[in-house]
Amino acid sequence: MGDTISRKRVEDLELLVEQLSMQVRALQELCVRKKLFTREEFKTLVHEIDSVDGSMDGRTTRVGRPQKRGD
């Protein structure tokens, strides 16, 4: 039963990541179309933010564990 719950949780997280990815792409495209910034400026800023933690790995580094709801 625990394996089924874990699998469902992974599927839920994968769906969330896909949805967030699509939303970010849509926001980026909207901003480019409205000439708020270019794709190159966006890419440069993403790299700048990625390097803040000292590691250019395409990930953000969290400090500590995220709190559970209700904490």
Image (cartoon, grey):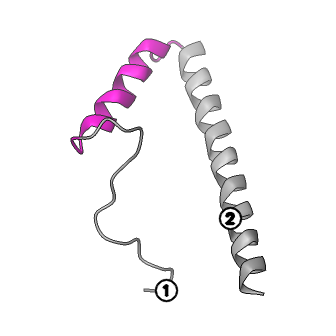
Amino acid at circle 2:
Val
Q: Nearer the viewer, residue 15 or 56?
A: 56
Whether residue 48 is in magenta: the answer is yes
Real-space Cα distance between discs 2 and 1? 22 Å
Q: Residue 22: percent from the left, percent from the top?
A: 67, 37
Looking at the picture, tell me which residue is in the foreground, 65 or 20: 65
**Residue at the spot x=68%, y=45% of the render?**
18
Which one is earlier in the sequence, the residue at label 2 or at label 1? 2
Q: Which residue is mark 1?
A: 70
Residue 45 position by quadrant? top left
Q: Is residue 12 above or below residue 51?
A: below
Q: State the predominant SS element of the stretch in magenta.
A: helix
Left or right: 44, with 21 as reference point: left
Residue 18 is labelled as none
Which residue range is magenta in the image? 35-54
**Residue drawn where x is 54% and y is 22% of the image:** 31
- Rendering coords of residue 53 (x, y %): 24, 45
Counting the numbered discs, the total is 2
Q: Which label was assigned to residue 10? A: 2
Residue 27 placement (x, y as % from top left): 59, 31
Between disc 2 and disc 1, the foreground one is 2
Say which element carries label 2: helix
Location of residue 47 (image quadrant): top left
Please state the horizontal and vertical placement of residue 49, each as a whole percent of the image.
31, 36
Give the structural element (helix, strand or loop) at label 1: loop
**Within 10 Å of the Cα at label 2, are there few (<14), some (14-19), or many (20+) other Cα atoms?**
few
The kind of residue on which mark 1 rests is Gly
